[in-house]
Amino acid sequence: MKDVPTPDRPVLHARGISKFFPGTIALDDVSVRLMPGEVHALLGENGAGKSTLIKCLTGAYRRDAGVMELDGQEVDPASTAESQRLGIGTVYQEVNLLPNLTVAENLFLGRQPTRGRFIARRRMNAMAREVLESYGLDIDPAEPLSGYSVAIQQVIAIARAVDMSGKVLILDEPTASLDHDEVQLLFRVIRQLKARGLAVVFITHFLDQVFDISDRATVLRNGQVVGECLLNEVTQHDVVTMMLGRQLEARVQNRDTGRAGKTLVEISDLGKRGMIDPFSLTIHEGEVVGLAGLLGSGRTETANLIFGVVPADQGKITLRGKAIDITNPRDAVAHRFALCPEDRKVDGIVGDLSVRDNIILALQARQGWMRPIPRAKVEEIAQSYVRALDIRLASLDMPIRLLSGGNQQKALLARWLATNPDFLILDEPTRGIDVGAHAEIIALIEQLRADGMALLVASSELEELVAYSTRVIVLRDRQQVRELTGDDISPATIIDVIATEEAAR
Amino acid sequence: MIRSTYLPLLITLATFVLAYALCASAYPAMLSFRVVANLLTDNAFLGIAAVGMTFVILSGGIDLSIGSVIAFTGVFLAVILRDTGLHPLVAFALVLALTTGFGAAMGATIHYLEMPPFIVTLAGMFLARGAAYVLSTESVPITHEFYDTLQDMYWKIDGARFRLIGLVMVLTFVVGIITAHRTRFGQNVYALGGGEQTARLMGVPIAATTIGIYAVSGGLAGLSGIVFSLYTSAGYSLATVGVELDAIAAVVIGGTLLTGGYGFVAGTFFGILIMGLIQTYIVFDGTLSSWWTKIVIGGLLFAFILLQKGLTWAAEKRAAQARLRTATGSAALS
Amino acid sequence: MSTPSAGPRPSVFKRILPQLVILAVALALNVVVFPDFFHIDFRNGRLFGNLIDVLNRGAPVALLCIGMTLVIATKGIDLSVGAVMAIAGAVAASMVVEGHGWGTALLAAMAAGGLCGLWNGFLVAVLRIQPIVATLVLMVAGRGIAQLVTEGKILTFDNAGLIHLGAGTVAGVPTPILIWIALGALVTFVVRRTALGMLIEAIGINERSSRLAGINSRVLLVCVYLVSGLCAALAGVIVAADIKGADANNAGLWLELDAILAVVIGGNSLLGGRFSIVASLIGALIIQSVNSVILLSGLPPEFNLVIKALLILGILVIQSPRIGNYVYMLRASDIQPQPDRPKPIDHQEKEAAR
């Protein structure tokens, strides 16, 4: 590295970046300055333009306007490879390394040390070991990458990016699939890079982590910069207000979670080794049971186990007092259970099928292929849900993948509501959808409860969980640690429980 | 230290040793240099083509055209040597350039038109076979003194003749192994097989690598065709039908995953030998009918596919446990 | 745009239009090289003519591509159909040679084909082996098994009933034509009049989601490979009946490739999802028409394969995803992803939904 930037001059200065897509302005005159030795958080809701901005900075997209200066020199990367060469490295949420190659091969792919025309493997392994040790990792670089945990793979990806680029490191949701301690491992590495004078861009949905590691933040909303701030001068509340552009509604006050009806489902000691510890849970008609806990605490696993996505290896489920056997989702659907999964793209939508077919899919599957739902009935069901849930689409014939995230989620809800379920499990129902659709889905949950349905909702958004839950189960380290009821239900108590409760074995 | 990644290779090797031991215990005569020499000579053309196929499969693709390309090469050489005064070496260079270019063209079609390799190389298969028909529909004998010279080159050990073409195959494998593990191109092939999208993000030149892979496969099919013409002293457009299938089988039995990314060129060598051994055994036995070869190879294929499935499951389980360990281990720390 | 409209279902005709155009061009070429192409004679109680030949010769591939279309729709592929044809032909032949009636022989052949299909389905659906690998096993071993049945000989027979299936006529129309049209119509009817078609497409597009929606993907997967095996068995019997003998080495050789090609020319994606059996059948006819052009053009037969390869390459390039995407972008420029729009839920409307 030549020309060490002075502390007050940005390493990367992007000014007036704009990016247009047909019909929308994704970025509108966005400016951002990355200082050396600083972690810079990029904040904003989904669709605010964070990822578009990153893609413009790394050359994955061509920007339509604006100037980029790297160390005071104007640059114009046309591809990720070029921006990498210039000094801008990126690490994504899903680790972009190759599981079939060894750690060392991953670190040095495309720039292997050679002797003559051949790769010097021993030297490469030694170099890899040296690099990794500087990050505090003592692992065998000649082992395949797939043998290591996601956190370690993440660090390896960072090491590669820093080694290749070395001026700016962009971390795009690196902590999304890490647990608490893995996050700490990652943060140690980030602090180390900070000390080396790198400019780090950090993107995440977890505000706590932002305040934990970042020095400065730029907040985006609807493709525009709302503001830049030093994080030690503001509170979380300020930042959220900037992101949302409104005060957080004080929903907690007017909680009306109604009165629970008859017992519907009783789960006792349901568990699976290596996935989640046995848990018991009783759910009544007309109540919403919330599942809270950090990522990886077992929320999704609980939902999947009840629905038979993964068969349990112990415990039993009774429905209205009768023992039932659920070994796969088909059984669950037959008992009028429904599950809206967390990962909409992978587990939810059937992308190329029409919205209409997606909506009737579960109902049709339950009826069996022999008894097709008459076309007129299909039309009626689909139309009524499109209207009721306000799904915005050009035509029911369009493939569902063309809908926006929020509309996809509503169509999936429609799929399950069409089966007229008694017990609806929602896993992260509001993830990755914008504010408007968000509010609609919360209202829908409250409506369904009022109509007497039993719901189990897993969510990482505590505010909303508190708003609609009759009871909240708190999970930690794949165990149920506490059940909160009545006035105990508040974001503060939930965080408290997650942070302090000793897992009661 | 033996790494888990080498396990499939070791199993193939063990299968070969075991198979050979079984053969030798039934027919001690099979334990001779003559059998080994014949094994190398008889399977030379298949082995050379299988090296190319290994690269293609490692990258996650498939090449159905190699059998046709081998036949085309044979006919091309035979016709050239019959109708022109070109020296065979010039003809060799010509046909290698032709087949390499043909492979590269298929690679370019796959990459730039985003068409599945299966379909593109299927069209290539028809095209090459058709071109062979156009050149000649009859078997054309090759008579050239240079061919006689090459065919007479052998090394005698213990009465067994190790011929030139066997040596060419072994050399091809050596070069293939070094290319796969010691060059950037080889690493890029593995990277492509691990995931094209990721490889692209990591800066692997996808276009050049894809085109290169199919060019290598085409070129090696050409070399295989030359060797086949030396082996049979003729070019026949109906020859080597279905060799691509044998090559794929050898690659899979050699421990390479058909989904790409995992495997070894060296494994293919033993895959070839195992398949050759089965044929030799049936010849030695004399009472077994030839169709048992196909059934046994099919069975072996199935066994190795199951084995790979088992290994993949085990690896996934290990990875899940590793994840759990870090999770619970760190929880204990906090 | 914002009001969801029912809109007509994408019509079948629109879906198969490109294939029909290509078929028309192929047939027109036939007429160019042989003006009497469409001339059909009725002699000795049988229809004669080049068009009839195209329909008749195309029967094996047409039969194969019915099952293949379903398999490919589930994101699979069945490489073993050629070998299964050989097995089925061998079984049928050996049955009549042993003195059984043609009905029994046909049933036995179908059972053998069904068994092969179940085996493939088991590997794919239960053992979760990648389809191309799973069916490769039977592709390699199948001809060996067929030879085992015929004991390495070409098994000839003279059972009139069996021969009728391949070489006979019903009301003047060659039986194979009737068989493939009937089976194609039957399968199309079954998958489209029941929910089967949609469920198969759902599996092919996203199996995880489909399973979570309660679809029994395992059984459906086994079923499509079963159907493919049965289609292959029928094709095998017809081919054997046509030559009055079972040739384990050559029966159905490389026809799996023609069948896959027919499906792809039919505009079905090898990546699974939306399918059309009718389009695949037209694809099979296109291949046969191309063969016919080359035959009728009087070009030396050795040019057949080259011309066929080039024509097919041309058709595939026209349909390649790259070019397809480009066309789609042009056509779909008015179907943009719809943005979410904040709007409070109208309670009245929601009541209607409940």
Image (spheres, coloured by chain):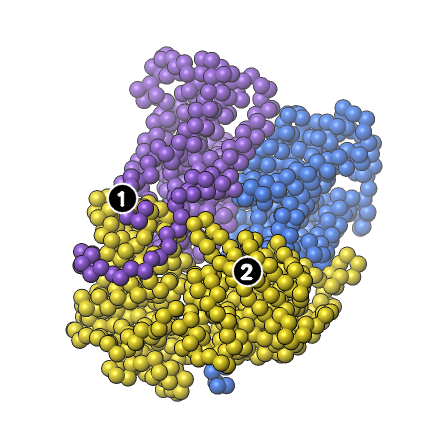
Q: Of the numbered discs in the image, which one, if any, rests on residue C6? A: 1
**Subunit of label 2:** A
Q: Are marks 1 and 2 on the same chain?
A: no
User: In this rendering, does residue B322 appear at all?
Assistant: no
Name the quadrant containing residue A441. bottom left
Q: Which residue shows up at 31% across the image and 81% down it?
A: A490
Q: Residue B165 lies in what quarter of the image?
A: top right
Along the line of sight, the residue nearer the viewer: A383 or A194: A194
The residue indicated by pointer 2 is A16
Image coords of residue A208 (percent x, y): 45, 78
**C36 or A393, which is in the foreground?**
A393
At 66% from the left edge and 37% from the top edge, which residue is drawn? B102
Dot 1 amino acid type: Ala
Residue extending furthest left?
Answer: A262
Q: Position of residue A399 (x, y in %)?
A: 37, 48
Question: Mark 1 or mark 2, which is nearer to you?
Answer: 2
